[in-house]
Amino acid sequence: MGINSVFIKNNEPVSLLRYWTTRYLLTLVIGLLIIGAVSAYWIKYAAIEKQIEVTRLFAEEVADRVVDDVGNILVGEKLHQVLDNRRKFMGVDRNLILFIEDVKGEVVYSRPTKLPPSLQQAAPGLLEQADTRDKVRHPSGETLYVIRKYLEYNGQIIGKVILLFPETDIKVGKEEIQYLVIMLGSLGVLGWAVIYFHARKLSEPIQNVVMSARQIVEGNYDVLINKTIKEKEIHELVHTFAEMADRLRQLESMRTELLAGVTHELKTPVTSISGLIQAINDEVVSGEEQKEFLEICLKETKRLQKMVEDLLDFNSFAVGAITVCQEEQNVNKLIREIASQWRIVHDLGPVTFTVGVLEKQTMIYVDPGRVQQILINLLNNAKQAVGENGNIELTLYETNTDLRIDVKDDGLGIPAKEQPLVFERFFRGSNKKDKVRGLGLGLSYSRMMAKALGGDLILANSTSEGSVFTLILPKRKEKSEEIA
């Protein structure tokens, strides 16, 4: 059972604030327990060292008092009282066991005078071990610390003082434990408070994003998240979400306009056809006029059919079902033929149309039909942009990596706020919406076909002085597999 199961109830996620606060609190508790254990060990160690140091000082005090001025060991009746006073003054525990040995190793003094029978029997062995060890084992199994101090006179050892005290007599001060508990408790409360408020601050902008997302789900795209956020990742999340909301709002507006536009565009020819056929059926017109009405009905039917085909084609294109059949082509010849055909079909009148190609003949593998579709669409848009009088330029040139074809016009251009949307499906700019009929799929088609050819279609530039669309084709000199 993993630690994450602590934060999940009935397989439902918990809030970010609760998740990270609880997770951090568990981590903090474990960390403080480890710190507490290490600190307790250190306090115990410090207490042992302190007890050893105090006992060592007491041993030196004893050594100074039992050696007289001529090098004799004096253990008179008053020594017992003097040592008790000094022990109390220095805070040495009363369970201290004291032995004074002469130079021959014989015990000349012990404190207490009467040792317990078990200790009295084990005393010789303990004293023998105490000569080389810092710890010895009491017959009861208790550990005894050893402090040795040699008695010297004129540089010669005349005996030694041996002090033994039990490990259990080392007491850790209550104040130190209290301070440790208070410190760890304060750190725990402070750490919990810090993570709680920081997690709360972190979760607040995310919660705002969640609430805004719910509004979008409910159909309200006018969401605002204006709070200043210092964290880079959270700022990027909120900023990206705001951009997404704005994009969805634009797409929703486009969808509404599309529905109205498609309805209007389809309704208009249907209404015309219905009215004209009704007039013929009611014999309101006859003869040549009746024939003219039928011709109009046929044109409107073809236009209606073209709209339906555009919608069907777009659905196919949208799922990547674009057939590309590449052939080896002289790119200069191809561009001239496309331009010539377009010029013949359209009555340009005062509109100036110029074509520029490469100085050298260049052969590439490309689908000429798809290139023609793209360029015809761009040229039609350029003609709509310039209106009755203007200039259109079709220019072929090459770079180090690809071939490029610019379609340039000197029309009104595309407003800056609409430029990022020109390749969106069903988008129709403000300059065309009320003047030219259509579904807003031409540029979307064209870009899809350009990508299928291995290139791209971009809006290179657009200002109030005109626009430039660029078709990019790869310099592929070997026939690639057909793309479907």
Image: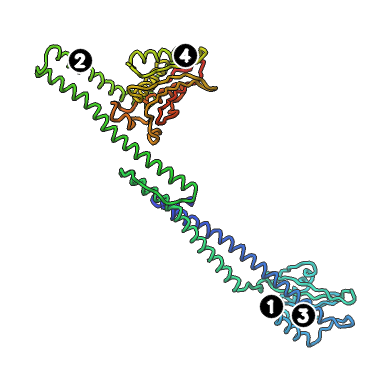
Q: In terms of depth relative to the viewer, which is nearer, 476 or 323?
A: 476
Q: CA distance from mark 4 to mark 3?
A: 121 Å
Secondary structure beneath dot 4 equals helix
Numbered label attached to residue 110 = 3
Q: Report the Cα–Cα distance between label 1 and label 4.
A: 110 Å
Give the mark, 1 or 2, whose residue is nearer the N terminus.
1
Task: Please tell me the numbered disc located at residue 332.
Answer: 4
Does 120 appear above or below 409? below
The residue closer to the viewer here, 37 or 76, is: 37
Q: Mark 3, residues whose alpha carbon is within 10 Å: few (<14), some, or many (≥20)? A: some
Secondary element under disc 1, as helix, strand or loop, is loop
In the rendered structure, the answer to whether residue 119 lies left or right of residue 435 reads right
Q: Nearer the viewer, mark 1 or mark 3?
A: 1
Residue 110: x and y, percent? 77, 80
Find residue 93 and name its label: 1
Classify residue 52 by image quadrant: bottom right
Residue 334 numbered tag = none
Q: Are marks 1 and 4 in contact (CB under 8 Å)?
A: no
Q: Position of residue 234 (x, y in %)?
A: 46, 48
Query: Dot 4, crowdedness within 10 Å: few (<14), some or many (≥20)?
Result: some
Disc assigned to residue 295: 2
Residue 42 sits in which quadrant?
bottom right
On the rendered structure, is 292 left or right of 336?
left
Q: Amino acid at mark 2?
A: Glu
Picture colour scheme:
rainbow
Residue 261 location in percent, x, y?
27, 30
Q: Between tags 4 and 3, which lies in front?
A: 4
